[in-house]
Amino acid sequence: MSASLPIGDFSRATHLSIKTLRHYHEVGLLEPSEVDPDNSYRYYSEDQIPIAQVIRRLRNLQMPVAAVKSVVASPDVEARNRVIVEHLDRMEGELAQTSSAVAELRDLLTRPETPRPVEHRAVAPTRAMGIQQTIDRGDALAWWQGALGELHATVEAQALSPTGPSGGLYASEIFQHGRGEATVYVPTDGSVRAIGRVVPLLIPATELAVVRHNGPLTDIDLTYGVLGTYVLKHEISVDGPLRENYLRAFFNTTNPDEWETEIGWPIFPTA
């Protein structure tokens, strides 16, 4: 017969604090083997020590209590291991995101300031094949790649030829409120047949302040900051969607370091 341990001794044996053990009892994660009906003292069996050790390590991995309960209650090893592996996969993803954010921040802190030339450009109306959709900002990169891939496949399928670089229009609401209308397009003079999400478009004329961003889009906000500072400093900003021209992107090369993107900010005509 296993020994019965008061909560204090069980705490010392498992390195789980009394406060934590009480919490685990309340949420049904690790219930005492016995509770004295007269004084509510909690007692644990020595057989619960291995379970407590497992729980402690899973919680040290930031596994939610609900997931730990699933592990403890799993009827077999395979089911238990599946829950643990799923959590470890999530942790690896979060670690990769953290590592990327740390690298970007270090680069930002150590990057030398170099002047970025800003060009004023009058853009004529452009006939194009495009896809328009209201998107969430968090989905923008995945949507952008999928929509542009679809457009380039459709251009080829309809035997059309681009007349300029692919581009995008992005409503201010995407940046200001996290959701808004986005358009990606491929300029073409040919007759575009609407199919699925793809429609013929006329991209309107505009006047832009333009700056070039080299490399992946993960830090394109830094180039947006340069351009925004310029137009605000010169008091020439006007309402309208921001534009991007993809001079070199994923459909040209699989190396993001070789990507080239022009960013255009709508401005008052300056000519």
Image (spheres, grey):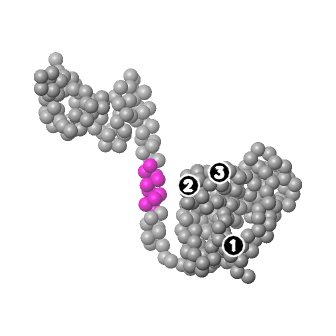
Label 2 element class: loop
Q: Tell whether position 112 is magenta.
A: no
In the figure, is residue 7 to the left or right of 108? Answer: left
Q: Is residue 137 above or below residue 51?
A: below
What residue occupies the far bottom of the structure in this picture?
271
The amino acid type, in three-letter code, at marker 2 is: Gly
x%, y% of residue 247? 70, 65
The amino acid type, in three-letter code, at marker 3 is: Thr
Report if the CB atoms under discs 2 and 3 are less than 8 Å apart. Answer: no
Query: Residue at label 1?
Result: 208
Q: Is residue 17 above or below residue 165?
A: above
Query: Which residue corresponds to the image point at 80% horizontal and 64% vertical from the top-left?
Result: 126
The amino acid type, in three-letter code, at marker 1 is: Leu
Q: Is residue 34 above or below residue 201?
A: above
x%, y% of residue 176? 55, 60
For marks 2 and 3 on the same chain, the one whose residue lies earlier in the sequence: 3
Query: Residue at label 3?
Result: 134
In the figure, is residue 85 to the left or right of 215? Answer: left
Label 3 element class: strand
Query: Residue at label 2?
Result: 178
Count numbered badges in the picture.
Answer: 3
Can you tell which quarter of the image residue 190 is in?
bottom right
In the figure, is residue 263 to the left or right of 187? Answer: left
The range drawn in magenta is: 94-103
Query: Which residue corresponds to the image point at 64% horizontal and 57% vertical from the top-left?
Result: 254
Query: Which residue corresponds to the image point at 16% horizontal and 32% vertical from the top-left?
Result: 7
Q: Tell whether position 101 is magenta.
A: yes
In the figure, is residue 260 to the left or right of 122? Answer: left
